[in-house]
């Protein structure tokens, strides 16, 4: 027993004959935020999809020190939850109906309790609960995607580029919310192109390039790594 919540060993993923992940290994302690950073096309989304079971992967995925179940549904039932890059909200449904959908595996009293917690955490969504999701701003849509995911009471949240397309001030708000979620006990695997902001809130970081881990370590160390600064953090 390693005590890790998630442990990936030698993960390979191919699309047809093209292999895009070439043996990725990664470990996550319970209650931590781990960020996967890297350029467009590095394979970050593919890695999240492999953990969720959306794409088939070779290698070992241990969750709670046991092999993760095979199907996506079983992984959701075990507490994994993915917020995809495109958010995939139902734009013609209200905020509250979108949130409700996230709780489909939970019973009525769990849903009621979680709903109240969520509206306290996201007062903007509480104010807009009757509004159609399609009328929200970009930042509010990302909050709604997070809230819907949290309605499933996940243990491991997989976030794909939550800052994508948002203004810098809103990025900071969203990442603050992500950082605070750690206090609720949920662990977060955060994929980001916005490396600097992600490393600020993460415990550990992995730099992925062309389907391989190029660097990994405590986020605070990666944030001041000269080579990383040059390529990903914008040198000063
Ligand atoms: P982005 O930030 O652009 O999403 P990423 O780091 O998340 O980039 P992936 O989306 O995982 O990277 O893509 C990794 C590689 O796999 C890329 O070369 C991409 O073109 C390729 N790829 C992704 N999805 C598919 C697919 N469904 N079929 C074929 N190739 C794919």
Image (cartoon, grey):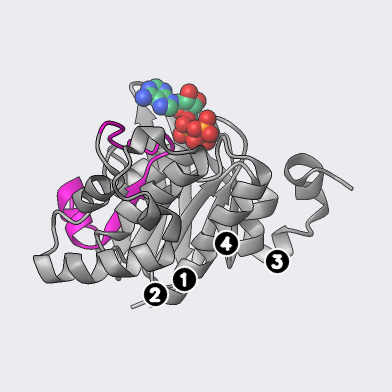
Query: Circles 3 and 4: CB distance less than 8 Å?
Result: no
List the residue tagged with mark 1. Answer: 182
Q: Is 87 positioned to the left or the right of 194 in the image? A: left
Tell which circle, 2 or 3, labels the residue nearer the N-terminal end: 2
What residue does disc 3 label?
A: 220
Under circle 4, the secondary element is helix
> In which quadrant of the rendered image does the N terminus lie?
bottom left
Q: Nearer the viewer, mark 1 or mark 3?
A: 1
Front residue of this view, candidates 128 and 161? 128
Q: CA distance from mark 2 to mark 1?
A: 5 Å
Q: Residue at x 46, y 63 (%)?
A: 27
Q: Is residue 18 visible?
A: no
First reached walking from the N terminus: tag 2 or tag 4: 4
Q: Which residue is mark 4?
A: 176
Question: Callout 3 environment at 10 Å: few (<14), some (14 to 19), or many (20+)?
Answer: some
Residue 236 at least partly seen: yes
Q: Residue at the location (42% across, 66% down)?
A: 121
Count residues near mark 4 (Cα–Cα under 10 Å), then give few for <14, some for 14-19, many for 20+: some
Which circle's residue, 1 or 3, is located before the other in the chain?
A: 1
Q: Residue furthest top?
A: 17
Residue in the picture at 32% in, 59% down: 150
Q: Does the CB distance between marks 2 and 1 fall below 8 Å?
A: yes
Q: Evaluate if marks 2 and 4 touch, with contact meaning CB atoms under 8 Å apart.
A: no
Using the rendered view, name the quadrant where residue 50 is placed.
Answer: top left
Residue denoted by label 2 = 185
Along the polypeptide, which appears first: circle 4 or circle 1? 4
Q: Nearer the viewer, residue 140 or 206?
A: 140
Q: Which residues are magenta?
A: 68-92
**Alpha-carbon span between mark 1 and mark 3:** 17 Å
């Amino acid at each position: 027993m390693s005590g890790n919540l998630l442990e990936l060993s030698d993960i390979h993923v191919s699309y047809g004959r093209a292999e895009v992940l070439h043996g990725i290994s990664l470990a996550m302690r319970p209650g931590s935020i781990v960020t996967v950073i890297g350029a467009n096309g590095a394979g970050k989304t593919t890695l999240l999809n492999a953990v969720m079971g959306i794409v088939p992967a070779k290698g070992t995925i241990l969750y709670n020190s046991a092999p993760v179940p095979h199907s996506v549904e079983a992984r959701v039932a075990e507490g994994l939850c993915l917020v995809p890059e495109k958010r995939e909200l139902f734009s013609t449904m209200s905020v509250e109906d979108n949130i409700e959908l996230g709780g489909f595996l939970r019973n009525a009293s769990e849903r009621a309790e979680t709903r109240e917690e969520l509206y306290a955490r996201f007062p903007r969504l509480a104010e807009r609960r009757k509004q159609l999701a399609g009328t929200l701003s970009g930042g509010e849509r990302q909050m709604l995607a997070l809230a819907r995911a949290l309605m499933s009471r996940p243990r491991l949240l997989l976030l794909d580029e939550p800052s994508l397309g948002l203004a810098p001030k809103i990025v900071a708000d969203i990442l603050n919310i992500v950082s605070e979620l750690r206090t609720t006990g949920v662990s977060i695997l955060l994929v980001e192109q916005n490396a600097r902001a992600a490393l600020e809130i993460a415990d550990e970081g992995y730099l992925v390039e062309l389907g391989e881990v190029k660097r990994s370590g405590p986020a605070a160390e990666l944030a001041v790594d000269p080579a990383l600064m040059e390529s990903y953090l914008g040198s000063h």
